Image: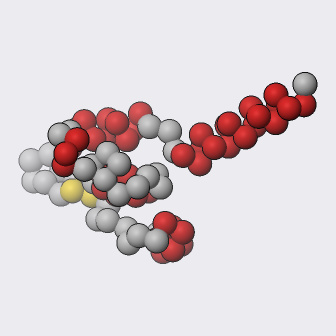
């Protein structure tokens, strides 16, 4: 985690939300940080998303690094032909 904190320039948020009713759940802010997204990209209050909606959006998201790699490969394939 320390290395990712140095790379992102942000301190890691708490990784889990604890609840006696539902048990531990991933913290949306932590998932957002772990994916390398800007702070508030999904979790900003103004978006009006519930915690479940935030986790769904983050779970369905693509890591920017993965998208960049895929696009770079597609560009190389296109340039070769």
The quarter of the picture where residue 49 lies is top left
Q: Is residue 21 left or right of residue 57?
A: left
* Residue 73, image quadrant: top right
Residue positioned 17% across, 40% down in the render: 48
Evaluate whether residue 81 shows in this view: yes
Establish if 81 lies above or below 1.
above
With respect to residue 10, does 29 lie above or below? above
Residue 71: percent from left, percent from top = 68, 36
Q: Residue furthest right?
A: 81
The residue sitting at the left extreme is: 21
User: How far from the left and from the top, in percent, is residue 81?
Assistant: 90, 25
> In this orientation, does residue 26 appear?
no
Numbered-mark total? 0
Q: 8 above or below 64?
A: below
> What scheme was used to colour the molecule?
secondary structure
Direction from residue 7 to residue 60 in the image, left or right = left
Image position of 68 with respect to 6: above or below = above
| 61 relative to 52 in the view: left or right | right
Counting from the top left corner in percent of width and height, residue 72 is at 73, 40
What residue lies at 41% left-to-right and 33% top-to-bottom?
60
The picture places residue 36, in percent across and down from the top left corner, at 47, 55
């Amino acid at each position: 985690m320390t290395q990712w904190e140095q790379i992102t320039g942000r301190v890691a948020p708490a990784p889990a939300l604890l609840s006696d009713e539902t048990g531990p759940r991933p913290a949306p802010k932590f998932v957002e940080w772990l994916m390398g997204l800007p702070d508030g990209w999904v979790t900003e209050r103004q978006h009006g998303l519930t915690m479940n909606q935030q986790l769904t959006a983050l779970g369905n998201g693509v890591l920017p690094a993965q998208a960049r790699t895929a696009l770079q490969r597609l560009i190389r394939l296109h340039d070769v032909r």
